[in-house]
Image: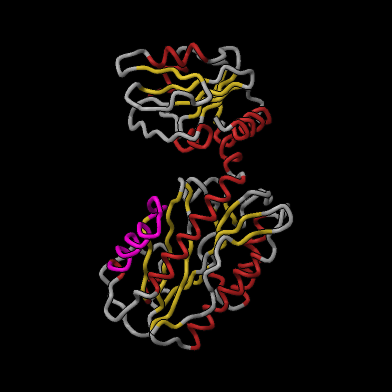
Amino acid sequence: MKQNRVDAVLKNLDAMGLSQVLITDPLSILYLTGRLIKPMERFYALYLNNKGGHKIFINQLETVPEDLGVEKVRFSDSDPYLDYVFSAIDHGEKLGVDKNLPARFLLPLMDRSAAAGYENASLAVDKARAVKDEQERELMRRSSKINEMAMAALKERIRPGVTELQLAGEMEELYASFGADGLSFPPLVAFGANAASGHHYPDATALKPGDCVMFDAGCTYGGYCSDMTRTYFYKSVTDRQAMVYNTVLEAMQAAIDLVRPGVELRDLDLAAREVITKAGFGPNFTHRLGHFIGLEDHDYGDVSVSATDLALPGNIFSIEPGIYLEGEMGVRIEDLILVTDEGYENLNSLSKELEVVQ
């Protein structure tokens, strides 16, 4: 197991007044053990206790390394696997469970009074995952670099009559050619008025001169996600389009300039929102400024006016302001920002200056 990560989870668990937890989210188990298993409907869990006695429950169908650094409890489909879980739990203490534990597994344990009580302990793992160690940071850097190479190559494929679906399909090919493991989410490609929908899904719309061209895409590398958005203009750009674009870029930079350990995450959102509001587009910035990212494209944590957390060294989140004008256009620009001990590191270096593609 990754002991530094296990220790962080146990520390968070203790702060919640809990001594034990049953973790069933496969990505969280990957985070703690280095092994990814996709159990489908079968039971799969990691049990942690701050007194020791950690166990991982794995169906015999799964192939796992001999040494996972934790006691393995193997079972078949016909075995009474919940009996094994019941035997591991400290019955006199509350049991923390994560948000992924299905009722078909939890309710039988509750019926048998497996623990003195039950509590959602997802935050014990989520908050640990939100602070990336150096290994994770390096994987995130590499994932973002591949993402940049693919997006730069995709920009070169903008051409007369190409459709959103065609470019989205070509993006997947580009990722594979640059060494990505896969997609962190399906690529979003939007032309012209389609970009006014922040999450427009590519369709058969063909590119025409004067359109804005929005690419929002990400890949995975070593299990870690990247995510970046760039907006270009095809053949020409109007003064209004340029003003909207530069407003978004100014808002983005206003937020990035504030990033440092201890800053309130909501202040980043407010800084970007103030720029956009002063330009007269406040109602057209329709989403939060950013989200945390790691093993999932949208990890626990966000950068919004309702966020209550402070930025911590090791946090990685997006900064992605946008302006969306229905029936006309949309602009979003997005980078991933790593909070460092003294400030920040931008994981993206692909140009954000306004660009007209010919």
- Residue plotted at (45% across, 61% down): 147
Q: Is residue 246 above or below residue 304?
A: below
- Residue plotted at (44% across, 77% down): 232
The answer to whether residue 289 shows anywhere in this view is no
Q: Is residue 120 above or below residue 276?
A: above
Prevalent SS, magenta region: helix
Q: Is residue 308 left or right of residue 229?
A: right
Residue 195 place in picture, x, y as percent: 40, 71
Residue 352 place in picture, x, y as percent: 53, 73
Q: Is residue 259 left or right of residue 292?
A: right
Q: Is residue 41 left or right of residue 85?
A: left
Q: Is residue 36 above or below residue 253?
A: above
Q: Is residue 77 left or right of residue 227?
A: left
Based on the picture, tell me whether residue 183 belongs to the magenta stretch. Answer: yes
Quarter of the figure with residue 155: bottom left
**Residue placed most toward the observer, 219 or 187:** 219
Which image quarter is the C terminus in? bottom left
The magenta-colored residue range is: 166-185
